[in-house]
Amino acid sequence: MLETSPREALKAFLQFAGPHNYQLLLRIFQQQLAKQKCYVTLEELDRFIEK
């Protein structure tokens, strides 16, 4: 079983699926966070993942 952190999994997704699909996934996360009253930009999400 492969154990990874969410950040590592998203970085792997970017390499596997490409930048366009990665941006779509970030938008989905952004929408889900907004439903919970947590408003972030796509750039903030991307910076958080890249740490």
Image: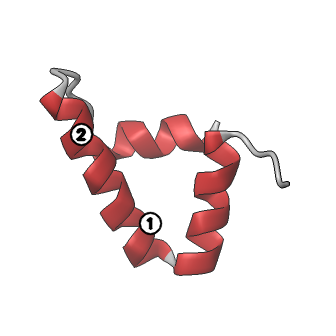
Indicate how the structure is coloured in the image. Answer: secondary structure
Q: How many marks?
A: 2
Residue at image location 40% in from the left, 74% down from the top: 21
Residue at image location 58% in from the left, 54% down from the top: 10
- Separation of marks 1 and 2 at Cα, in angstroms: 15 Å
* Residue type, mark 2 in image: Gln
Quarter of the image that includes the N terminus: bottom right
What residue would you read off at disc 2?
32
Q: In this view, does 16 lie to the left or right of 23?
A: right
What residue would you read off at disc 1?
22
Q: Which of label 1 and label 2 is nearer to you?
A: 2
Q: Residues within 10 Å of mark 2 (few under 14, many from 20)?
A: few
* Residue type, mark 1 in image: Tyr
Quarter of the image that includes the C terminus: top right
What x and y, as percent, mark residue 25?
Answer: 37, 60
Could you say whether the residue bearing mark 2 is in a helix, strand or loop?
helix
What x and y, as percent, mark residue 5?
Answer: 70, 39
- The image quadrant that residue 35 belongs to is top left
